Image (tube, rainbow, N blue to C red):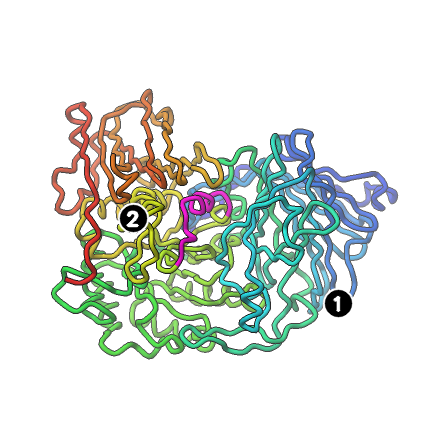
């Protein structure tokens, strides 16, 4: 395990003996907490209730907002101040299997207030956010009836929020806390949000011109239900709500059965009374581009548990469920059979993707120990491992919950290195605990985890780094049956959902269409936007273990482009967002472990021209290999081209994107070895040797028929 490196940690305890009784009672006025840069000030008021407010550069950021806890029928938070402690820290966290950056700076100032009714309130002010958490010190098991979260904002803010489909839940005979956490963002003035609308996190609050945006989420969620929000009715703001504790469940669904709560308690959690509760996180962004690289959730995710994590490995796999195992130009009948998966093994070895994936269908949904006839999973896993691949297998939450040790033991015996668990579709206390159990048990067996039908990341990957990735988003499977995945939605994700952590989006589709040509085609999916729009997602959506969503046969027809996708790293030394506007465009810069720089950009349906100044490069000459929309991408979305030139830090790269377009560039020192794409010997770093600019126009091949 990599260790946390502490640059400085200073704890300044203000003893109760040196504080007057009047000050203890809170009569001295608000208690301030100032961010290290001095720009953000959080004020804590106590006495009758606990209220938090904040300013940034002297302007209101958070209006007085009540917080508290109702425990065993008693409301905590109305007491007076018994103890007050200040501290600050400036640490560097050496992250483990965190895609955004290897070194994470954790710099804040903190106040811990203890009230005489037993409630503790910890408030941290960072340069890029504020966070608070509640705590109790009760030596018994307690029932948490409710947590008071009443966030209030200045002005007339606009809210970006994914709202659960309560009508759909009711139609299925379940409550609104059952959701796959896959909803588009409703964007409207906060005052216009429906009173009964339930938003799951993260949500974004835009208080208007000259005020920072505030992204609301949570971190260090352990043994507790997830926070939801709904519009308040008394002032511009959001009130917290939580799924009540499930008392009874039943199984619904036939193809993919899952457990749903049919009876809930009058409380939200039953837990140890001596504990801290989850962090309530407000990430602050002076400009939209400040959001995607913000790592506050990881910082607040806890402490990495000791042990050997060196076995974790990044990489990509195929994602065959997206195209129903339909292949072409192969000498066998494709489907759920061993020949098909041996083909996937050969594909992964050829392009060096690192992983083989068995999606739904390899076993009975309700019994992962019952393998589909004609598919020799144990032999295929052994073969893949023998060729240096990791192997991840899909499972259902219901099956894993019923027989977790037996299922994971079997996967381990076969040699699997990862498990995907699907269809939780809840975040009540019991379900949150299920995630923790899965990740811990998988870690014992040296397996990564991948959750679908999942709630947003809350920093679990900080404590248990094998919690590699999860969905919690409308991902690319929706191309099969819906038109919801527009470039606008896809350019919104890095600014909201992406802030929370890794996204298993499954991009990289090879069949692409402009808006007027898109159709949902089931097992032969196409995407909205260009081929390069899909490629840029590997820069914009983080996931240490990622998937290549295109058809393997399509990839094999274009080995040059496929090798380019396979070579994009999934772990990064550093991340910078250079420019962007929510739902419009984004431009990002990342540094790989080998020191090379990768830049990516993506746009909505508006074609754009941007530029990338190369002043971040050190002295010397570099090869700039740019993959971009082709000259005909505005009509034929699969059109792309590759340009190569020699550059220095004084140069600027032009970026031209078609409607729904994208752009990716790799910048490496001249002469640095690189992986040469399979069957494309013309690709080299020759531009550095000659000092010329190499340009290779390349149109993507037309979509091929499914069967030949």
Residue 683, above or below 83: above
Residue 676 horizontal/vertical position (percent) = 17, 42
Answer with the quarter of the image where residue 26 lies.
Answer: top right
Query: Which secondary structure is most common in the magenta stretch?
Result: helix
User: Is the C-beta separation of discs 1 and 2 under 8 Å?
Assistant: no
Quadrant of the drawing holding the C terminus: bottom left
As drawn, is 384 to the left or to the right of 169?
left
As drawn, is 524 to the left or to the right of 274?
left
Q: Secondary structure at mark 2?
A: strand
Q: CA distance from mark 1 to mark 2?
A: 56 Å
Region rendered in magenta: 482-496
Residue 486 located within the stretch drawn in magenta: yes
- Closer to the camera, 135 or 651? 651
Residue 357 horizontal/vertical position (percent) = 30, 62
Q: Which residue is mark 1?
A: 72
Q: Which residue is mark 2?
A: 512
As drawn, is 530 to the left or to the right of 398?
left
Q: Secondary structure at mark 1?
A: loop
- Residue 271 appears anywhere in the view: no
As drawn, is 241 to the left or to the right of 96?
right
Q: Residues within 10 Å of mark 1 (few under 14, many from 20)?
A: some
Which dot marks residue 671? none
The residue positioned 64% from the left and 46% from the top of the image is 190
- Closer to the camera, 658 or 500? 658
Query: Number of numbered discs present?
Result: 2
Residue 182, above or below 587: below
Residue 60 horizontal/vertical position (percent) = 69, 35
Residue 114 horizontal/vertical position (percent) = 75, 51
């Amino acid at each position: 395990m990599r260790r946390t490196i502490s640059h400085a940690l200073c704890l300044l305890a203000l003893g109760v003996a040196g504080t007057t009784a009047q000050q203890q009672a809170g009569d001295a006025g608000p208690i301030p907490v100032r961010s290290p840069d001095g720009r953000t000030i959080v004020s804590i008021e106590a006495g009758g209730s606990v209220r938090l407010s904040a300013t940034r550069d002297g302007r209101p950021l958070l209006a007085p907002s009540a917080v508290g806890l109702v425990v065993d029928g008693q409301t905590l938070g109305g007491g007076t101040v018994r103890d007050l402690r200040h501290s600050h820290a400036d640490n560097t966290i050496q992250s483990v299997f965190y895609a955004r950056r290897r070194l994470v700076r954790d710099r804040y100032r903190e106040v811990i207030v203890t009230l005489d009714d037993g409630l503790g309130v910890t408030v941290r002010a960072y340069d890029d956010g504020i966070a608070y958490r509640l705590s109790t010190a009760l030596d018994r098991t307690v029932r948490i009836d409710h947590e008071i979260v009443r966030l209030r904002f200045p002005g007339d803010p606009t809210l970006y929020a994914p709202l659960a489909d309560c009508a759909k839940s009711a139609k299925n005979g379940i409550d609104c806390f059952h959701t796959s956490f896959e909803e588009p963002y409703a964007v409207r003035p906060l005052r216009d949000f429906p009173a009964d609308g339930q938003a799951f996190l993260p949500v974004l609050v835009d208080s208007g011109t000259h005020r920072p945006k505030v992204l609301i989420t949570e971190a260090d969620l352990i043994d507790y239900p997830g926070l939801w929000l709904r519009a308040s009715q008394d002032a511009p703001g959001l009130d917290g709500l939580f799924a009540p504790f499930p008392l009874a469940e039943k199984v619904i669904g036939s193809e993919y059965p899952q457990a749903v709560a049919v009876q809930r308690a009058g409380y939200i959690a039953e837990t140890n009374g001596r504990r801290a509760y989850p962090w309530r996180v407000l990430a602050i962004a002076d400009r939209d581009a400040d959001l995607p690289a913000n790592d506050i959730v990881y910082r607040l995710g806890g402490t990495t548990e000791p042990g050997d994590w060196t076995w974790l490995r990044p990489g990509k796999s195929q994602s065959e469920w997206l195209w129903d195992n339909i292949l072409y130009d192969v000498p066998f009948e494709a489907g759920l059979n061993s020949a098909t998966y041996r083909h996937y093994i050969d594909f992964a070895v050829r392009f060096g993707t690192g992983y083989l994936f068995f999606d739904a269908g390899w076993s009975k949904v309700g019994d992962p120990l019952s393998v589909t006839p004609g598919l020799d999973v144990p032999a295929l896993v052994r073969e893949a491992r023998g060729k240096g691949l990791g192997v991840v297998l899909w499972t259902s939450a219901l099956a894993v919950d019923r027989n977790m040790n037996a299922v994971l033991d079997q996967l381990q015996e076969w040699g699997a290195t990862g498990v995907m668990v699907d269809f939780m579709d809840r975040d009540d206390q019991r379900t949150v605990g299920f995630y923790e159990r899965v990740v811990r048990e998988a870690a014992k067996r040296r397996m990564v985890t991948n959750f679908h039908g999942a709630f947003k990341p809350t920093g679990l990957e900080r404590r248990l780094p094998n919690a590699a990735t999860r969905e919690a988003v409308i991902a690319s499977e929706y191309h099969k049956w819906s038109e919801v995945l527009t470039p606008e939605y896809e350019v919104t994700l890095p600014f909201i959902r992406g802030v929370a952590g890794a996204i298993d989006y499954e991009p990289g589709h090879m069949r692409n269409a402009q808006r007027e040509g898109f159709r949902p085609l089931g097992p032969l999916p196409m995407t909205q936007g260009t081929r390069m729009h899909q490629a840029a997602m590997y820069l914009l959506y983080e996931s240490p273990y990622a998937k290549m969503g295109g058809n393997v046969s399509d990839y094999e027809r274009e080995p040059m482009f496929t090798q380019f996708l396979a070579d994009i790293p999934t772990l990064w030394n550093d991340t910078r967002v250079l420019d962007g506007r929510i739902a419009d465009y984004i431009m990002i810069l990342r540094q790989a472990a080998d020191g090379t720089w990768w830049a990516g950009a993506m746009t909505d349906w508006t074609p754009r021209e941007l530029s990338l100044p190369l002043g971040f490069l050190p002295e010397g000459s570099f090869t700039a290999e740019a993959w971009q929309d082709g000259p005909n991408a505005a009509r034929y979305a699969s059109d792309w081209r590759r340009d190569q030139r020699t550059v220095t830090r004084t140069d600027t790269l032009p970026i031209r994107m078609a409607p729904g377009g994208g752009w990716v560039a790799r910048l490496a020192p001249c002469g640095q070895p690189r992986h040469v794409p399979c069957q494309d010997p013309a690709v080299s770093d020759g531009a550095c040797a000659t000092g010329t600019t190499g340009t290779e126009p390349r149109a993507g091949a037309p979509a091929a028929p499914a069967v030949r």
